Image (cartoon, rainbow, N blue to C red):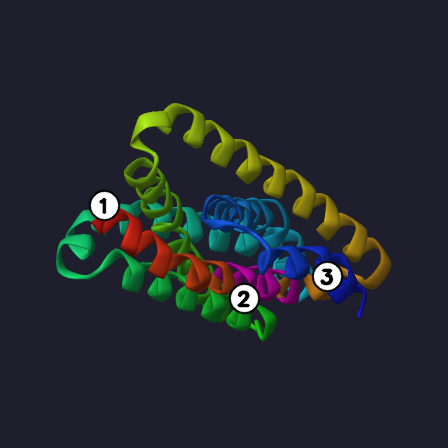
Amino acid sequence: MLLFLYFLPFIFFTFCLNLCNQIRFILFFESALEGMVNNWSTIYLNSVDLSGQDALYALSCQLAAIAFTRLFLSYFLRHMASGIVVYISLALIFAGTMLLYFTSSLAIAVTAMICLGMGFAAGFPIILGYVGDLYTEISGTAFSLVIVLALTGNTLLNYLVGIISKSQGIGSFPIILAVCVIMMAILFTLAIKKISIKIKN
């Protein structure tokens, strides 16, 4: 219930935002997800009885998965629509959060972190590509606004995790990640048709 109340303003404003702001808030949550996983996943894994060394190994696998997937991102984009790649990425992130929630061994933790890393790989490149295509005449300003909001999301939601973990425990960490993924999916679904129409025009 506490988690819902924290995200209620975002849920309300999601349905009132224009396309530009929808894109910004996609990266708001993307940046927040990446930051939260980097900052809090080892603490969460320690809480489910994984050693500090195992938790760091799982985090390293996530970072390697991001780098490895980005190497092949251009190949995927040549063979699939960018929107489909984004939805696959969101599905991978959600799968990773669910695996993280049910983690009981190093193998599950590593699998979860690899799913998260693969899911994170496409977010920034594709969404920033949309920004460049949509706002060619003011691309510098558009990129600046998007990056500022992304950094804001990273900061605010990391702070939120700290508050929630202090009051309810770190066990709610995967649930926070899942809520962020759902918000991204809602925003992207609202935005993708408008993006396609504007780019074609």
Q: Which residue is mark 1?
A: 71
Label 2, residues with CA under 10 Å away: few <14, some 14-19, many ≥20: some
Along the viewing direction, whichever of 4 and 154 lies nearer the viewer = 4
* Region of the chain picked out in magenta, as a range: 175-184
Task: Write the residue at 70% across / 59% down.
Answer: 7
Which sits earlier in the primary sequence, circle 1 or circle 3? 3
Please name the amino acid that badge 3 sits on: Leu
Instruction: Report if the CB atoms under discs 3 and 2 are less than 8 Å apart.
Output: no
Label 3, residues with CA under 10 Å away: few <14, some 14-19, many ≥20: few
| Image quadrant assignment for residue 134 | top left
Which sits earlier in the primary sequence, circle 3 or circle 2? 3
Task: Write the residue at 36% across / 50% down.
Answer: 121
Q: Nearer the viewer, mark 3 or mark 2?
A: 3
Q: CA distance from mark 1 to mark 2?
A: 26 Å
Q: Which mark is residue 182?
A: 2
Label 1, residues with CA under 10 Å away: few <14, some 14-19, many ≥20: few
